[in-house]
Image: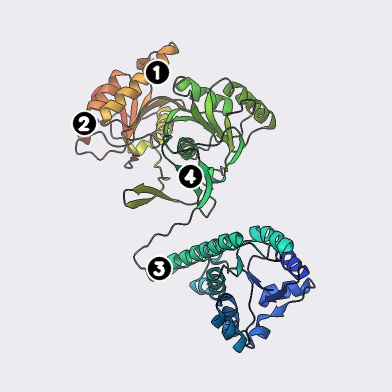
Amino acid sequence: MRALISVSDKTGVVEFAGRLVAAGWEILSTSGTMKLLREAGLPVTSVSDVTGFPEICDGRVKTLHPKIHGALLARRDVPAHMQALQENGIEIIDLVCVNLYPFRETIAKPDVTMEDAVEHIDIGGPSMLRSAAKNWESVTVVVNPADYATVLQEIESTGNTTRETRLALSAKAYTHTAEYDMAISTYMRAQAGLPEKLFLAFDEKQPLRYGENPHQNAKFFRGPVAVPYSLATARQLNGKELSYNNIQDANAALNIVREFSEPFCVGLKHMNPCGAGTGKDVVEAWTKTYEGDKTSIFGGIVAFNREVNLAVAELLKPIFLEIIMAPSFAPDALELLSTKKNLRLLEVDMPAVGAAAGKQMQLVSVNGGLLVQEQDLDIVPVEAGQCVTAKKPTDKQLADLNFTWKMVKHVKSNAILVGKDGMVLGVGAGQMNRIGSAKIALEEAAATLKEAGKDIRTEGLVLASDAFFPFDDCVTLAAEFGITAIVQPGGSVRDEDSIKKADECGIVMLFTGQRHFKH
């Protein structure tokens, strides 16, 4: 039995080859892998000795030879194939262990040149993998060190791998070469300026019990590159398996958390924030979140951008929540919250604001197609120079407007959000007209304050809108509820009507020039 081993990822390869040798196998190899195995004291035959031809063109040509590909492709059950091997002095190869030049890692370097990228395009490796994978009935092909243990266990037990294992490994090899070719194609097309063709390569992370509803099948896939604020790489410390809806909601919560550098907490239901707050610590942030809407938080998701400590855990425990997310949990907080066996606790990588990776592409499926856009990570700060009314904002109002502007960005359109002092008090989401969203947000804020013994008309609240006001009705309604300042993108043909109404009501209004539709 003969194995050809030539790998870029040399993890575990010495042990793998050593155990094959111990099982009576002959090892063929090339270049760096051959050197490594020989230094480990293993008997290795050079591929050049097999082909009778030296490596040429700086190693570009070494395995592209009939004595390699004939040895892989010849069908053992076809006499004419075996006769051709015998007539040409070719011995069969029973196992190929190959992984490819690190092309994706090379082009990820900020200073990579096209010349360097091209030199990391593997030719012989994919060719051997495809040959071996095509003849899987007789040849074992290994591309991932994670499969070494299975292959060795079967060979050491029976002398060879099983048919089922060879088929599975063949499929993995074709997947490996397909993903490799997709990366090269995407890079080369970009260099050539060709019209874009989108290739996707996602790995199944886990099957889900069902999708949005019990009659829908669903799975969770993760992308090839780890990114911050991602459930795909989150660590679940407690609780039931995540559901499809859990993942959607939790992802929305993480997108809100990444907006804030100060201690922050958000509560979320059905892809919309139902409460949020900043504070000097997580206890104050949670208190504002909970006080903002005690009803909607029931069965919701909570996310923090700071470690969950015991003090806040004691406040969280009595509330029915589906998920709590944070960059970390203090050991005593984790112990306390883990007494609720169904409560999902997730540690999520959350780098400092501004240190996160660049924009990722957002994919949305439609019937027969796919929409692709950059994530909406930009946000224009609210500043005094954006004021369009006679009355100008105070520093306190600017701080409140910045908070509500960051929050309304993550509410389903049409979106209106009311708040003050780093606290969300009312949210109007997803209505078919903007005045409808405004009524919901303002009435919710009024009810919350009334429960606390306060009157909305005297609290000096501010209001944010994700898009412009088409009419002055939202300003009129805001004035009735005592709103003192409004931030919106501006850009309506009727902007002057809204500005005039704000001036009549003594309301400060600012235009950011940036909208945040969220459908």
Which element type, helix, strand or loop, lies under badge 4?
Answer: strand
Q: Amino acid at mark 3?
A: Arg
In percent of width and height, residue 421 lies at 46, 25
Image position of 501 with respect to 245: above or below:
above
Mark positioned earlier in the residue sequence (2 or 1): 1
Mark positioned earlier in the residue sequence (3 or 1): 3
Mark positioned earlier in the residue sequence (3 or 4): 3
Q: Are marks 3 and 4 in contact (CB under 8 Å)?
A: no
Q: Nearer the viewer, mark 4 or mark 2?
A: 4
* Quadrant that contains the N terminus: bottom right
Q: Are marks 2 and 1 in contact (CB under 8 Å)?
A: no
Image side of residue 370 versus residue 123, left or right: left
- The image quarter in which residue 135 lies: bottom right
Q: Nearer the viewer, mark 2 or mark 3?
A: 3
Residue marked by disc 4: 219
Q: Amino acid at mark 1?
A: Glu
**Label 2 environment density (alpha carbons within 10 Å; few <14, some 14–19, many ≥20):** some
Image disc number at residue 471: 2
Which element type, helix, strand or loop, lies under badge 3?
Answer: helix
Residue marked by disc 1: 459
Label 4 to label 2, Cα distance in Å?
44 Å
Mark positioned earlier in the residue sequence (4 or 1): 4
At 40% from the left and 68% from the top, the residue drawn is 189
Label 3 to label 4, Cα distance in Å?
31 Å
Residue marked by disc 3: 189
Image position of 114 with respect to 275: above or below:
below
At 66% from the left and 77% from the top, the residue drawn is 30
